[in-house]
Image (tube, coloured by chain):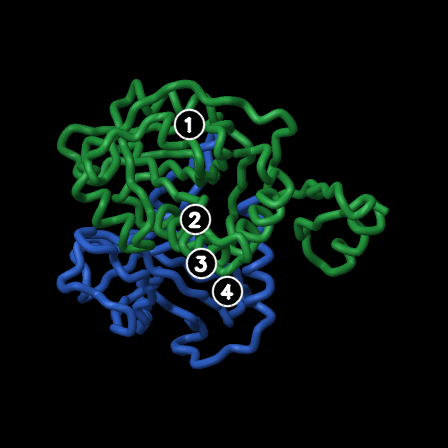
Chain colours: A blue, B green
Amino acid sequence: MRWRHAVFAGLILALTPIAAATEEAGISVRDAWVRETPPGMAMTAGYMVLQNKTSRPQVLVAASSSGFETVMIHRTVVKQGMTGMEHAPQIELLPNASLLFGPGGYHLMLLNPKRTLRAGDRVDIALEFRGGLVLPVACEVRK
Amino acid sequence: MIAAVALAAMLAGAWLAATYRENSSRAILLPDQVMTLFPAPRPLAAFAFTDHENRVFDLSRLKGKWSFLFFGYTHCPDICPTTLATLARAHENIAKSTAGAKDVQFVFISVDPNRDTVGKLGQYVTYFDTSFLGVTGDDAQLGKLAAQLGAAYLVAITPGMENYPVYHTAAVFLVDPRARYHAVFAPPLDAEGISRRFEVLRELEGPKAT
């Protein structure tokens, strides 16, 4: 059910015209946001829609941020009726396709923020693709 | 008539809970994929947790109110904050309904008491909604309630690993004011999907659930 939902959401988003896209070498990112951290918590998640506008697969291999000590690519999975997270060492973006990083699916796990983040703040994240391309992404902090 | 209502709901493009009234008195809740209702709600057996204000949270605390229960842990960047934010919006919706939210409570049950002290739990849950309760207990007590609800969890404490993995059922369980397991909401959850169905259920159950 969760995955069907994620796929539908991905399809709908893929059909939506791109607004305010950060563009570089045929890969764009939109609707990038980071969840505000509850008090005392040293972790949160980042979400976005990635679009590969090239005719070749693109492989996301790493992410980093000046605002967090550690950034990991994670995926929320359901196993034996239990929800958990697993590390995704790399994610392949299919040619001319979109990939949703959204609640309950792929997300960037952001650990140990360097300052307290409040809704409205901005977090800079760098996505690194195979071949050396680094895509800067400006994320809005939302509650 | 039931078929007609179901068809209308499908034509509307959504699996909305809908009421059907027979002779202006009896109403039913149409089954759907969001909420599973138990025709014979199961009375829950005793368990004992501690809430975020250091009070005992046991079976008696589930009586007299509808309780939405969610198992999770605070070191959870994705599904727990997503669910708690959804439940906070569902609570807002219920509070705006005619019957209000006085007979409703939301309880976050931490399956990770090793890291989730009562102080931390309080800070965490009240960030989402000041009325939310955070509770936890030892593994035996957590297991007692989880087993009755069909919930599962696994805390993979690993020596030397600060962010050890935790797995847990992501459904939201609804316990009625007689402390009976009455319904379960399956993920992916949305606030309106929960509040709309709950309001119908509460109206249907009325005094017999309390």
Q: Is residue B178 above or below residue B68?
A: above
Residue beneath the point at 39% across and 44% down: B106
Q: Are marks 1 and 2 on the same chain?
A: yes
Residue beneath the point at 61% across and 38% down: B205
Which of the two labelled residues, at mark 1 and mark 2, occupies the earlier sequence position? 2
* Disc 2, SS: loop
Q: Nearer the viewer, residue B28 or B170?
A: B28
The chain holding disc 3 is B
The chain holding disc 1 is B
**Foreground disc of the pair 1, 3:** 3
Which residue lies under the disc numbered 1? B152
**Foreground disc of the pair 1, 2:** 2
Which residue lies under the disc numbered 4? A56
Residue beneath the point at 19% across and 31% down: B114
Alpha-carbon distance for marks 1 and 3?
Answer: 28 Å
Neighbours of disc 2 within 10 Å: few (<14), some (14-19), many (20+): few
Alpha-carbon distance for marks 1 and 2?
Answer: 30 Å
* Disc 4, SS: loop
Alpha-carbon distance for marks 3 and 2?
Answer: 12 Å
**Foreground disc of the pair 1, 4:** 1
Which residue lies under the disc numbered 2? B102
Residue A106 visible to the viewer? no
- Which amino acid type is shown beneath numbered disc 4? Arg
